[in-house]
Image: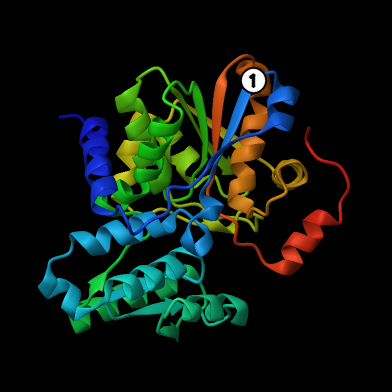
Amino acid sequence: MSIVSSTAAAASAAAQRCAGHLEHTPLQRSTTFSDALGAEVYFKLENRQTTGSFKLRGATNRLLTLDDEIRARGCVAASSGNHGAAVACAMRELGVTGVIFVPEQTSSAKIEKIKRYGGDVRLFGTDGLDTEEHAREYASETGMFYLSPYNDEEVIAGQGTCGVELVEDLPDVDAVFIAVGGGGLIGGTGAVLKAHNPNVRIYGCQPLASPVMTRSVEAGEIIDMPSEPTLSDGTAGGIEQGSVTFELNQAVVDDWILVDEAQIAAGMRAFMDSEFDTIEGAAGVAVAGMLARRRELKSKRVAVVICGGNIADDKLASIRSVEGNAL
């Protein structure tokens, strides 16, 4: 069985396993974008998922696949953002105890959000890598389970439930645009879509400021490279060596698109102005990626995964303060 078919099968199993624990998020047709692009444009609204992002899918599926003994030991995660909130929420829902480590400079607003979902938040490290390494060590020393944000087959399968819903709601989709960080969302969702229809075109979208997966695929191996500041903080940063997402991304992504900060902001404004909904920078990357390929989308059925809607008030205000959008 190929990596695509095995991942698709695991996502299908995850969808059954997670039924009742996750929202089946809306697939919304956009009249404004459809008219502007001469296509049928749909947005998969993962910003409407509980916790405001797709991350709850992977966290929930992973916890549900643990046996009772491992669950009883507790769970550890490292994240100041969507993954941390998702793990905290899933642990509360499933009665699992655990710890969420965040970098020391994490904003109080982000910490409070994780706490709202019941998370035991602890500060460690000055950047994400320090925090993650400490979380792994803590899990190893205490016998707790470390829940990775992407480098885990069952997490990827959980994210792939987004693709299961897409196939149910728009089985004849021609092209799908997805933002890429560690590659779990596009890996799981892309595998489901490709298993359903090998001809569907999957676009991986990344910020030019942090194009690690794109450059790694080009190089044929995971590379270590610096990332610059970006509106798409949810996709920024490196990829673990040996990550299971790398081969899967190689297999399912047909085209890689890099967008700059102005394109991301313009894509966010275009979406928010037309759809009357708030999105985060990573979702703006996928919108911007679609707009960058608009000429090849005429008369196509297009879906864009709006991966999340969690954005700081000051960042949202700075985006809103600039006039004009990309349409």
Residue at left 22%, top 44%?
13
Residue at left 32%, top 73%?
91
The amino acid pointed to by label 1 is Ala
Residue 302 vertical position relative to residue 228 in the rendered view, above or below: above
Q: Is residue 311 visible?
A: yes
Residue at left 49%, top 39%?
215
115 vs 284, left or right, is left
Label 1 sits on a secondary structure element that is: loop
Q: Is residue 243 visible?
A: no
Residue that carries the numbered disc 1 in the rendered image: 39
Q: Residue 12 occupies which quadrant of the picture?
A: top left
Quick one: 136 or 161, which is closer to the camera? Answer: 161
168 vs 302, left or right, is left
Residue 165 image point, x, y percent: 40, 39
Residue 141 image point, x, y percent: 21, 82
Residue 167 vertical position relative to residue 65 in the rendered view, above or below: above
Quick one: 32 or 20, which is closer to the camera? Answer: 20
